[in-house]
């Protein structure tokens, strides 16, 4: 789960990482009031769940008397398809140096890895691509945690200039915040050294591990449903793993691997999937019915491909669910199915004579549905 | 022969009294798996499916010879249950549970490895040596005894590939679902050496997925050490960047874990890559002919 910058900074502040004073505003008037309270130069920053806010014009410096106008321009702005509904109004920082400090869970080393770089304030992925040596990486022992001497060592290796103890302390606190909130990613970029030598997190990003939200009820309630596609919200109510995509072939399958494979086949056949939908293991007819209903509701969908390999899931249960949705008239587009595995014969018998195109293998079925929605694109 | 488990493997079920544990224990017993004990803290002294239940793994180990444990404990307590088995000296722990907090796994995987115990999963379907033993949740009937080892990050796709191998007459030796999470106990490159040594396994199929670098590391190992044919498959080749496709692990971040990088690594190791499940069978046949 992604957090907004202001939420990430609240977590960091709780763990003792210095952040600039700031408050959230939902209207230009609120923004002005906050800026006037501070009585000095502020930075007004769009709070949306996408990167590249600065480049899109969603981050601007303003004097208190300009803040209403500047906030007015940012609020309501569209950044990569998301409307800006709130801004962070924060005291501007007097920047002498801009560094990068981040933590991620690294699959290869199976550790939380600390990354520190002198090249802060810019797109760190770009630095990783063009100048990987500029990022010092340090895998952390999960049982010992990050100790101050380790952080000092990394700060030295990365060549950061400024008060060594303060820099290391901010990084240790960042690690404590990461572990304490069960994050999957935590970044301070830039980690600023001010003209008078203070260390401050001028911007921050934290993603939380969805699997661990159950032990952080205070953080779990920060999820913003409007940030996700309405069909994704509906799907999560049904308990489906669903992702909205931008094509026109609706996809339903059992098991994440099989559904991904089905997306691949549709792409290979020249089509574009409209979604990823995994009905999970052992699904009964009503679950399948809801899945078909959901996908059929998507106005982008011009045809549906249901790919089932029965294991724990019985193919005949799937067939019953599909038939129920068809008989209720919920589906106005062609449906292609491929069923195999447990109860395959029973499923085929049930589907006989129904308005469904049944194919013996996945690739043939993928080619057929792509033709039905208007051919390869 | 097979790897890791066979018809004589004696199995403990952690979470035997729960809905999932009980259902799958029953399926495993039907398959022929030797389930000798169960553990559910606080339910010691009961009997489920004719199997004695203990409060702790230590108690179970004191009363039975146990070769492997399969864990069906809910996510919040699953890593702890796997650690309990490892500390009790169970040499193989199969962690089925889905949705375990990632940092729990970071800590548990290191500790379990330090104890010299093999952990498979979490969030995995387990493993099966065809027509011998099933320590997992896969549909047993699609696996026929044969010549091909199978390692996979996916569930359903594994069953489908195993069924295709069985139907073609090639059949399976041991199939291991290693799990789709970012932090797992056993990766492709940990299992390839075992298949390389297994006299019954003539070829190995590696069903990979986008995300991470396990496939690349496996390819590097194959290039240096493998003396049996390996056939590859990569799922999620058309998945958009940054979208999580059900498996927490199947997500491309930046340039890491792209299908291009995996295909290149397989090509450099001389591993032919199938585009479809049916093609896996063709490529294995070709490699063995």
Image (cartoon, coloured by chain):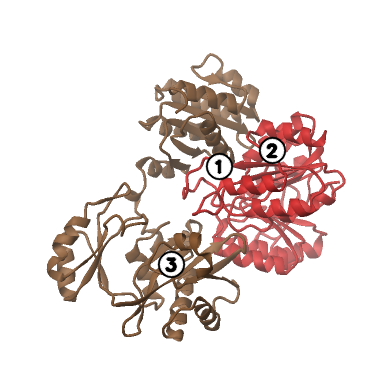
Chain colours: A brown, B red
The residue that mark 2 highlights is B139
| Badge number at residue A187 | 3
Q: Chain of mark 2?
A: B
What is the quadrant of the N terminus of chain A in the image?
A: bottom left
Q: Is residue A294 visible?
A: yes
Residue A363 vertical placement versus B249 (above, below): above
Residue B93: image quadrant is bottom right
Q: Chain of mark 1?
A: B
Q: Secondary structure at mark 3?
A: strand
Q: Secondary structure at mark 1?
A: loop
Labels 1 and 2: the sequence-earlier one = 2
Give the CA separation, mark 1 to mark 2. 23 Å
Q: Is residue B4 visible?
A: no
| Badge number at residue A265 | none
Dot in front, 2 or 3: 3
The residue that mark 1 highlights is B236
Q: Residues within 10 Å of mark 3 (few under 14, many from 20)?
A: many
Q: Secondary structure at mark 2?
A: loop
- In x, y percent, where is residue B278? 68, 31
Mark 2 vs mark 3: tell me if same chain: no
Name the side, left or right, on which A246 lies relative to A69.
Answer: right
Dot in front, 1 or 2: 1
Residue B185 vertical placement versus B246 (above, below): below
Residue B61: image quadrant is bottom right
């Amino acid at each position: 789960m992604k957090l907004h910058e202001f939420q990430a900074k609240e977590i960091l502040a709780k763990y003792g990482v210095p952040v600039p004073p700031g408050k959230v505003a939902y209207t230009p008037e609120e923004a002005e009031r906050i800026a006037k309270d501070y009585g000095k130069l502020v930075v007004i920053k769009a709070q949306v769940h996408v990167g590249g806010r600065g480049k899109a014009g969603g981050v601007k410096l303003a004097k208190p008397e300009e803040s209403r106008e500047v906030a007015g321009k940012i609020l309501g702005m569209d950044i990569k398809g998301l409307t800006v509904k709130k801004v962070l109004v924060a005291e501007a920082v007097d920047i002498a140096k801009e560094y990068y400090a981040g933590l991620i869970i690294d699959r290869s080393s199976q550790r939380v890895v600390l990354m520190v770089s002198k090249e802060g304030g810019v797109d760190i992925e770009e630095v990783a691509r063009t100048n990987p040596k500029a990022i010092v990486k340090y895998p952390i022992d999960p049982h010992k945690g990050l100790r101050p001497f380790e952080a000092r060592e990394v700060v030295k290796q990365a060549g950061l200039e400024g008060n060594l103890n303060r820099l290391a302390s901010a990084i240790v606190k960042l690690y404590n915040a990461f572990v304490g909130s069960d994050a999957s990613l935590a970044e301070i970029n830039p980690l600023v050294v001010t003209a008078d030598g203070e260390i401050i997190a001028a911007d921050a990003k934290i993603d939380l591990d969805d699997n661990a939200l159950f032990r952080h009820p205070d953080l779990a309630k920060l999820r913003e449903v409007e940030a996700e596609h309405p069909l994704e919200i509906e799907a999560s109510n049904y308990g489906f793993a669903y992702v909205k995509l931008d094509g026109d072939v609706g996809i339903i399958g059992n098991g994440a691997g099989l559904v991904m494979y089905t997306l691949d086949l549709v792409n290979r056949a020249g089509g574009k999937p409209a979604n990823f939908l995994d009905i999970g293991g052992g699904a009964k007819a009503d679950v399948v019915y809801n899945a078909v209903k959901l996908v059929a509701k998507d106005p982008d969908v011009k045809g549906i491909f249901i790919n089932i390999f029965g294991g724990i899931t019985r193919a005949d249960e799937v067939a019953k669910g599909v038939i129920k949705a068809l008989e209720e008239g919920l589906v106005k587009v062609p449906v292609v199915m491929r069923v195999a595995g447990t109860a395959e014969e029973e499923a085929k018998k049930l589907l006989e004579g129904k308005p469904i195109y049944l194919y013996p293998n996945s690739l043939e079925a993928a080619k057929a549905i792509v033709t039905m929605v208007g051919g390869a694109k | 022969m097979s790897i890791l488990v066979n018809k004589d493997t004696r199995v403990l079920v952690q979470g035997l009294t729960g809905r999932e544990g009980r259902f799958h224990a029953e399926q495993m017993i039907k398959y022929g798996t030797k389930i000798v004990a169960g553990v559910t803290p606080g339910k010691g002294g009961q009997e489920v499916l004719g199997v004695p239940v203990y409060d702790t793994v230590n108690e179970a180990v004191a009363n039975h010879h146990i070769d492997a444990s399969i864990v069906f404990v809910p996510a919040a307590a699953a890593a702890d249950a796997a650690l309990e088995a490892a500390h009790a000296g169970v040499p193989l722990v199969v962690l089925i549970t889905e949705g375990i907090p990632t940092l729990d796994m970071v800590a548990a995987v290191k500790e379990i490895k330090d104890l010299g115990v093999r952990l498979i999963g979490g969030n995995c379907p387990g493993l099966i040596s065809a027509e011998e033993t099933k320590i997992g949740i896969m549909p047993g009937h699609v696996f026929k005894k044969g010549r091909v080892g199978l390692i996979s990050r996916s569930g359903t796709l594994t069953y489908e590939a195993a069924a295709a191998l069985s139907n073609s007459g090639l059949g399976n030796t041991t199939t291991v679902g290693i799990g789709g999470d970012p932090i797992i106990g056993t990766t492709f490159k940990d299992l390839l050496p075992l298949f390389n040594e297994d006299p019954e396994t003539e070829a190995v199929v590696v069903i990979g997925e986008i995300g991470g670098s396990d496939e690349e590391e496996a390819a590097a190992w194959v290039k240096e050490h493998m003396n049996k044919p390996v056939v590859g498959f990569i799922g999620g080749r058309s998945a958009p960047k940054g979208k999580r496709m059900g498996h927490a692990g199947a997500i491309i971040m930046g340039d890491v874990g792209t299908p291009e990088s995996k295909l290149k690594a397989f090509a450099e190791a001389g591993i032919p890559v199938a585009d479809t499940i049916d093609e896996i069978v063709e490529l294995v046949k070709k490699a063995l002919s």
